[in-house]
Image (cartoon, rainbow, N blue to C red):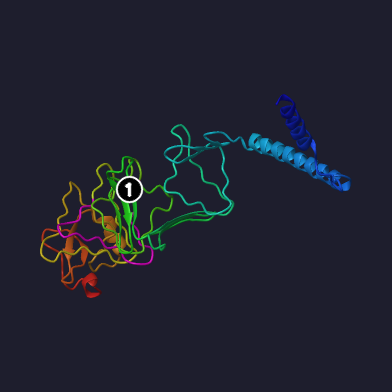
Amino acid sequence: MEQSATLDIETLKSLHLQRPGCDAVYPVGLYGWRKRCLYFFLLLLLVTMIVNLALTVWIIKVMNFSVDGMGNLHLTQDGIRLEGISEFLLPFYVNEIQSRRDSLLVLRSEKNVTLNARNDQGQLTGQLTVGPEAVEAQCQRLEVRSRDGSRLLFTADEEEVIMTTEKFTVTGSEGAVFGHSVETPLIQARPSEDLKLESPTRTLTMEAPRGVEVSAAEGSLKVSSRKDLQLESTEGEILLDASTIQLGSLPLGVYTASPSQASQEQDLYELCVCPSGKIYLSPAESSSTCQAVSNICLWS
């Protein structure tokens, strides 16, 4: 029994150790120029990665990228914050532009600065253009308010221009020129300065439903005209109230050989009125010397 078991084990070992024979052996791998090309491409890829990594680090350093933003551009919860001088080469669309509390907001352009406002349909509703020669505003209504925004100071539209300030001051040497009528409750000059109302080529008319008051509190009042000066009252009267009323350059309306001689000899005159309303002087005597046949009344 022991002999047979030993033979069987040896038989199995001999059977297990036997391998089939192979006619040819094929090598596995890259050899020759293929291997050299693979190493070259791997080396080229490694160099490219290193260059890209270096460029990325350089761009991050130059542009000053950070978690909050890029350089002077910072991303906040309310929007974008820019510090310093910023230049925009294309249109810039924002909802609100606000400067820092301790600095000014300056908009610069080589040609002009234009601010546009559009509605939901993209139509232009308002435009403000600051150019080298003029500042133009295009809108339906222009309003200027006080510092706190509660009081309206100036408003303008297609029909009228309204100023609600307590005082409107014109400091130009030539004053203010109005092409049409002006409605105001008071026209007053500055202290120690003259007030002049003039119409060089047309008439000057002042109208009010309850009255027109022209007064000079601390000086004289002068009304001059090249031709006729007419004071007319349709229903009331014309009142001249003063301690002294002087009518200068009145004609002497009497028949004398020499009016100049009569004016030198006569010191007291009588004020006469023609039927046409013209006033002239006549030498005063014990009785009235005014006569309707005076030369002044004849030529009036």
Looking at the image, residue 64 lies above or below residue 211: above
Residue 21 to residue 183: above or below:
above
Instruction: Report the amino acid beneath label 1.
Output: Phe
Count of numbered marks: 1
**Magenta span dominant secondary structure:** loop
Magenta region: which residues?
194-214
Q: Tell me, yes or no, whether the highlighted magenta stretch contains residue 288.
A: no
Query: Would residue 15 appear left or right of 283 to someone viewing this image?
Result: right
Q: Nearer the viewer, residue 107 or 231?
A: 107
Tag 1 residue = 168
Residue in the foreground of this view, choosing between 273 and 31: 31
* Camera-side residue of 106 and 186: 106
Q: Where residue 273 sits in the image (x, y, percent)?
A: 17, 66
Residue furthest to the right in view is 32
Q: Residue at x 32, y 43 (%)?
A: 146
Left or right relative to 151: residue 211: left
| Residue 102 picture location, percent across and down | 46, 31
Q: Who is closer to the viewer here, 139 or 300? A: 139
**In the image, farthest residue toward the front:** 1
Left or right: 298, with 103 as reference point = left
Quarter of the image for the C terminus: give it: bottom left
